[in-house]
Amino acid sequence: MGPRKDKTTRGATNSKREKGRAPPPSTQQVGVLVQDLLLDEDYDRYIEKFQSKKDVSPQFYYLLWDIKSRGFDFHELFRFQNLGSFVELKKGHDESQIKAFYCNAQRQDGVSFECSFKNVRVSLNPEKWESLVDLDCNGVDIEVKDTFTNYNKIDFVKSVSKTGFGELSFSNFSPLQLKCADRMLHRVVVKIIISKQHNYGRINDYDLIIMWLLKSKIKVNWLLFFSNYMISYKNDSRKKLPYPSFISCLLRSDRVTSVDTLVG
């Protein structure tokens, strides 16, 4: 097998974008090269399926206490769900490492993953979820609709809409029709929790259900929710890879930061 030529690091970006900017940081600053991180067979799979995969989806974040809201306790909704730490994860990730993780991650059960790199094994289990972002397995499975039979779409839309109900069109329901606080809530839901890929300007049934669960203070099994999204996005070549800030946090916790800090 010939020498590897891929030099993918966080500094590797579109040359047109970089025109006129300072040169990218050195390898030592940005972390592990993909070919140093993966075994040969995994690296070949990375080149085939993940190197050309659409970009990682940016994980927007909010400092919840900086958001001024009126009408209901916006912050308490996330505190009840223990979502504050996840929502407030700051942006910043090594795109090549995120792709390498998704390339190599194998699901062990509903909420656990194992990822074997060349010199380190990364584990994501319930204990790690709790230590990193304070989430646990308690709560309902969003995919099991019988767990929240009290949900009534029409009544809920009436409660969050700032316009008269007669003016609403479910096929064209947009965030602009939401009350201010509910519009902020929807933004956090689609940008961070769902990591929605496109069509932010239309509110679909899934957006509404998650907003209703949050506002109704029905505890959700977020570990299962996020794990399902991670595996479904990994297996869909058209979608960007979600939750890069969280994955970066996980990799740092297992010391995947640079060649010098890899451990066996």
Image (spheres, rainbow, N blue to C red):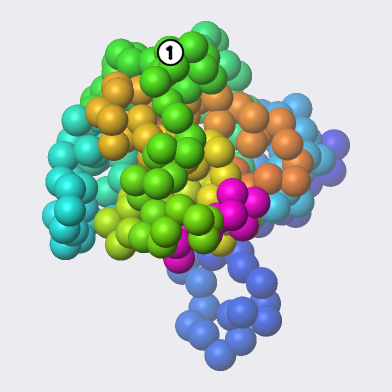
Q: Residues within 10 Å of mark 1 (few under 14, many from 20)?
A: few
- Say whether residue 233 is magenta: no
Task: Give the dominant element type of the magenta stretch: helix, strand or loop.
Answer: helix
Q: Is residue 23 left or right of residue 181?
A: right
**Residue 95 placement (x, y as % from top left):** 55, 52
In the picture of the structure, the residue carrying the numbered disc 1 is 147
Quadrant housing the N terminus: top right
Res. 32 visible in picture: no
Tell me the residue at 42%/59% (across/down): 164
* Vertical position of residue 188 compared to residue 68: above or below: above
Tell me the residue at 16%/62% (across/down): 68
Res. 234 visible in picture: yes
- Count of numbered labels shown in the rendering: 1
Along the line of sight, which residue is nearer the eye, 42 or 63? Answer: 63
Along the line of sight, which residue is nearer the eye, 193 or 116? Answer: 193
* Vertical position of residue 138 compared to residue 34: above or below: above
Tell me the residue at 17%/48% (across/down): 72
Quadrant housing the C terminus: top left
Along the line of sight, which residue is nearer the eye, 164 or 69? Answer: 164
- Say whether residue 172 is magenta: yes
**Residue 162 placement (x, y as % from top left):** 36, 60
Q: Is residue 214 left or right of residue 14?
A: left
**Residue 169 placement (x, y as % from top left):** 59, 54
* Vertical position of residue 185 compared to residue 194: above or below: below
Q: For mark 1, give the secondary structure.
A: helix
Amino acid residing under circle 1? Thr
Looking at the image, the residue that sits furthest to the bottom is 20
* Vertical position of residue 113 compared to residue 17: above or below: above
**Residue 227 placement (x, y as % from top left):** 50, 25
Along the line of sight, which residue is nearer the eye, 59 or 76? Answer: 76
Tell me the residue at 16%/58% (across/down): 70
Magenta range: 169-178
